[in-house]
């Protein structure tokens, strides 16, 4: 079956058409600047990508252009819409309502809407994408796959904040975690690669991309993860601060005369390795190049980032009373051997021994610890779209 995977943002929409039998991507692309002017980038498998400007006042036009491209007589990859058996939608926040993926019904749509408060930037956009697809593809089954669902197995001691309990009761203020599709995909693959049943292995997944999080997966279940109510908590990220002393907010608000919106903008957009590197870059390629040329803030940013990852690994090894596999994934985790090495330097006490040659490779599935290492350390490229396609097919 062919599954259309949709990841819809407020002004953009990424898509992949995946054949679920061969697990091959037939075509992929994205629509950008929806509601502003608009463009479609489209790439059938094995061919060059082509970007065309297209007027896209709403997401409905964007999806129509995607369908037109996929079914085009020359550049299309299917003959008609009938060859698309299902649509899988990435949805950011499922709150406490969704502990797994679901087939989208009117009730489900409403329940996702009720989670909008928890992810005001993301969920409404995801819903717009769902509504647009439903309009243009009536009768095609659709599935919602949530970033938060995998973490619904976290025990209460891991998800409660040290805040008044009434905020949990009234507003559901608690830790939810994100990147669940990736943590689930990578931890499953790690178990396969070490040849152990998924429910008998302790894995720590380090999803290190622009947004970054660590997850403790014990016997197939997420038991803790570094992001919280929102994706701001945890690791130092590209431009997000991660964990800080909350009292800094009052201090900086007074000094810099910032209101809540200004503070949130600072924490989400101006912090992380970008802020630490004195605004050099949020991209680790630039930071490594800068550090190699003697740029001190760039070096500090890399050190702070790696140290924070290592501290989370340590705390999750404690939470699970041990760890069998540590897996690195996403843009930095898959490609940046330098950062992986900096992290692994802290893990000697766990019996981690790095294989230098293996760690020098980039973007491929590989074990980067030595055969004698007490913990197996791996690079496992994530594939969230494939995971969404698999979930979609399993449900329908
Ligand atoms: P997201 O999906 O969160 O936007 P990605 O997982 O695509 O992020 O990761 C993007 C980041 O990965 C870039 O900002 C960059 O820091 C890092 N990255 C990508 N390629 C490389 C590379 N070759 N070397 C080091 N870092 C890289």
Image (cartoon, rainbow, N blue to C red):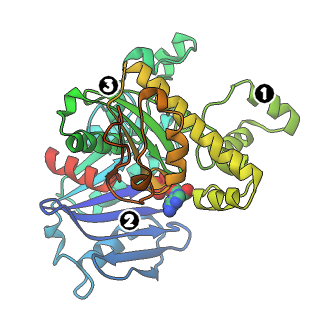
Residue 58 left/right relative to 94: right
Q: CA distance from mark 2 to mark 3?
A: 35 Å
- The residue shown at (58%, 35%) is 308
Residue projecting furthest to the top: 165
Residue projecting furthest to the front: 372
Describe the element under mark 1 as helix, strand or loop: helix
Q: Earlier in the sequence, mark 1 or mark 2?
A: 2
Q: Is residue 241 or residue 253 the one in the foreground? A: 241
Mark 2 is surrounded, within 10 Å at the Cα level, by few (under 14), some (14 to 19) or many (20 or more) other residues, namely: many
- Mark toward the viewer: 2 or 3: 3
Residue 12 placement (x, y as % from top left):
47, 62
Residue 153, disc: 3
Residue 269 placement (x, y as % from top left):
66, 49
Image quarter hosting the N terminus: bottom left
Q: Is residue 234 or residue 168 the one in the foreground? A: 234
Describe the element under mark 3 as helix, strand or loop: helix
Residue 250, disc: 1
- The residue shown at (26%, 66%) is 17
- Count of number-bearing discs: 3
Residue 46 placement (x, y as % from top left):
28, 79
Q: Kindly tell me whether mark 1's CB lies below 8 Å from ligand 1.
A: no
Q: Is residue 380 or residue 168 the one in the foreground? A: 380
Residue 167, disc: none
Q: Is residue 107 above or below residue 319?
A: below
- Mark toward the viewer: 1 or 2: 1
Q: To which residue does mark 2 refer?
A: 60
- Mark toward the viewer: 1 or 3: 3
Describe the element under mark 2 as helix, strand or loop: helix
Mark 3 is surrounded, within 10 Å at the Cα level, by few (under 14), some (14 to 19) or many (20 or more) other residues, namely: some
Q: Earlier in the sequence, mark 2 or mark 3?
A: 2
Q: CA distance from mark 1 to mark 2?
A: 43 Å
Q: Earlier in the sequence, mark 1 or mark 3?
A: 3
């Amino acid at each position: 079956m062919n599954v259309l995977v949709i990841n819809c943002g407020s002004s953009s929409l990424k898509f992949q058409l995946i054949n679920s039998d061969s697990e091959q991507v037939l075509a992929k692309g994205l629509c950008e600047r929806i509601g502003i002017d608009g463009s479609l980038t489209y790439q059938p498998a094995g061919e060059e990508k082509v970007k065309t400007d297209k007027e896209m006042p709403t997401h409905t036009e964007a999806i129509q252009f995607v369908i037109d491209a996929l079914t085009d007589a020359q550049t299309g990859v299917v003959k008609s819409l009938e060859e698309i058996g299902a649509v899988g939608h990435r949805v950011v926040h499922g709150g406490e309502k969704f502990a797994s993926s679901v087939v989208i019904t009117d009730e489900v749509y409403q329940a996702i809407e009720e989670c909008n408060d928890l992810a005001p930037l993301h969920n409404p956009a995801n819903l717009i994408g769902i509504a647009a697809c439903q309009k243009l593809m009536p009768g095609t089954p659709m599935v919602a796959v949530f970033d938060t669902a995998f973490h619904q197995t976290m025990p209460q001691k891991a998800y409660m904040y040290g805040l008044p309990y009434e905020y949990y009761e009234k507003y559901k203020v608690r830790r939810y975690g994100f990147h669940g599709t990736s943590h689930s995909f990578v931890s499953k693959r790690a178990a396969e690669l070490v040849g152990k049943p998924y429910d008998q292995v302790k894995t720590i997944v380090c999803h290190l991309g622009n947004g970054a999080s660590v997850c403790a997966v014990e016997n197939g279940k997420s038991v803790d993860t570094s992001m919280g109510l929102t994706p701001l908590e945890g690791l130092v990220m590209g431009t997000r601060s991660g964990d800080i002393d909350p009292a800094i907010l009052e201090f900086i608000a007074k000094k810099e005369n910032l209101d809540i919106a200004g503070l949130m903008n600072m924490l989400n957009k101006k912090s992380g390795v970008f802020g630490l590197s004195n605004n050099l870059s949020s991209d680790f390629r630039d930071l490594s190049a800068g550090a190699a040329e003697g740029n001190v803030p760039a070096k500090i940013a890399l050190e702070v980032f790696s140290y924070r990852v290592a501290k989370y690994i340590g705390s999750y090894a404690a939470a699970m009373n041990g760890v069998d596999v540590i897996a690195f994934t996403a843009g930095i985790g898959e490609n940046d051997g330098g950062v992986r090495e900096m992290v692994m330097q802290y893990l000697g006490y766990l019996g981690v021994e790095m294989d230098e040659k293996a760690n020098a490779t980039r973007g491929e599935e590989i074990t980067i610890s030595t055969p004698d290492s007490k913990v197996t350390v791996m690079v496992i490229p994530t594939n969230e779209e494939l995971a969404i396609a698999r979930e979609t097919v399993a449900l329908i």
